[in-house]
Image (tube, grey):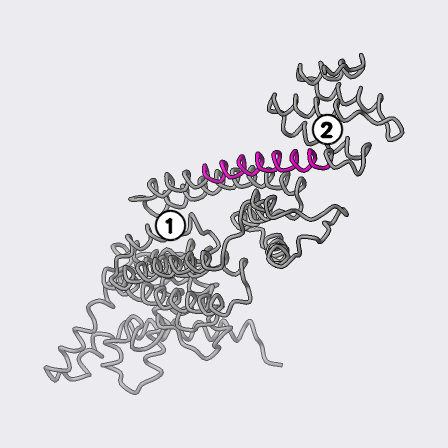
Amino acid sequence: MEITFSPIENKILQLFSRGHFDEGMELFDSSFTAEKPPTYDFILKCFTELNRLGKNPEAFRFMTRVSTLVQRHPEVIRMLEMARRIHYDTLIVQANAVMDGARQKLQVFAETLQGADALQRERIEKENRKTLEDLYRQALQIFQQAHEVSPRALGALTGMFRCHKELRNQKEADELAALIDEVYKEESGTKPEAEGEDGRPAKSPEDKADLPPMPEPADIKSVMADLEIEMRRIQGMFDENRTTDALAALDLLLLGNPQFIPGLLLKARVLTARREFRPAQRLIEEAVKIDSRNPKVEEARIEFLENKFKLLVAGASEFLNHGLRLGSALGRSFFEQALSCLNQALEICPTDVNLLDQRYTCLIYLERMEDAREARKALYMVAPQYIATFERENRSSLCFLAGFAYRGDAAALEDFRTLRREWFVPTASGRAFLAWYCRHSPGWVATAHRSGLPSWLPRLCLAPLRLLGSCLSRQRRRTYRRSHPTR
């Protein structure tokens, strides 16, 4: 027998069929109440029509509203659960499609990283991370909608968990992990007769089969085993000094597992070995944010600082020695590189006397006298009795020959030091002469020792310079006494 509907019911059906769902729901809400509920045939017709048009979210909204007006009707309950599953499954499929798109992007990004240098890699990683985060946020929104539809469904919960992990929302990921564990235990041990949270019967085994399954512990262990195998392979590359290959493999691994701490720490070690300290330090900081209580993270941070310090100290000494051999003019670039290494090393250990001493020497040869005075002040604040290398007897200008000629005569050596400070160091030509002298005078002294040259001969040659230094010393003492009169 053909079922006929009232004019109002036909009007609601027409609005639903034409895509005016909100208007149809307004008319439905104004026409029906709990005291005057809609008929079952009309409900079935609306539900069938919405599903025929592919309006799954609208069908679920409609049945949710109907369930508040028609209670304890088994067919209405069945249609509501069917609408819930259809809407839920549709959302899960959409979210998984976005996640698949993110995985495809990962593969493309991994290919673009091959052959890129450090600066290009950093720029590409930044751009890629932003693109991936947008996709993960989009998927998260869809998973959250599915979670609202079915709050205890594992598919939505695990999807949200994955998105939060990728977005590095550790707090939310931990909360979801606890909830997933709780639901998983319930799904494994709940009796079929048990009631759900809304008082209705719990889902049957057939209903549970419609939900995406929870990952098995064996699957999780398999993923971790694959990561461990890949890490051993990359570690082998690093041990063989194939840092470029190791870095490319780590880039690919971390694109898919951005919070994998062993991968972050190994990449930091590779970058440190390549003396790319800034990106290495950023990776260490990222690992600290993920798990600040992990002892391996703290060990890696200390190891990074130690390795960085050793490499910087060795580099500074090498550059400084090159600069001293070439002199202030030709060795300027070496002094600048040594100064850069020293500044970074002093950030790690700001009271290291040797580093402060070398920094003072570099600034002198770079003719940055104001900075040199500040460096000397910093050196003497750490070690007041310390004599800088530039001023020490066996390293300071005029003390090679003077030390040979005036052995044991401290007053004479002090006159030459005064001459160096007051006359040579303040001028560019004087500093150039000192650099030339430091390169050649050790050889002259060695020749004098081998040939048995008497010390009075170099004294005779150096007498005018000593006289000038002595005069400068007396002038300094007179100036000091006038500025500091005794009482």
Residue with the mark numbered 2: 62
Viewer-proximal residue, 22 or 31? 31
Q: In what quadrant of the picture does the C terminus appear?
A: bottom right
**Where residue 132 sits in the image (x, y, percent)?**
48, 40
Residue 276 visible in the displayed image: yes
The alpha-carbon separation of the residues under discs 1 and 2 comes to 48 Å
Element type at mark 1: helix
Q: What span is in magenta?
A: 77-101
- Marks 1 and 2: which is nearer the front? 2
The answer to whether 383 is drawn above or below residue 29 in the figure is below
Residue 340 visible in the displayed image: no
Identified by mark 1, the residue type is Asp
Identified by mark 2, the residue type is Phe
Q: Is residue 402 left or right of residue 211?
A: left
- The structure residue drawn at horizontal position 49% and vertical position 59%, both measured from the top left corner, is 217
Viewer-proximal residue, 4 or 469? 4
Marking on residue 251? 1
Viewer-proximal residue, 50 or 351? 50
Viewer-proximal residue, 332 or 478? 332
Q: Residue furthest bottom?
A: 408
**Where residue 299 sits in the image (x, y, percent)?**
46, 70
Q: In what quadrant of the picture does the N terminus appear?
A: top right
Q: Residues within 10 Å of mark 1 (few under 14, many from 20)?
A: many
Element type at mark 2: helix
Magenta segment, prevailing SS (helix, strand or loop) = helix
**Where residue 331 sits in the image (x, y, percent)?**
27, 57
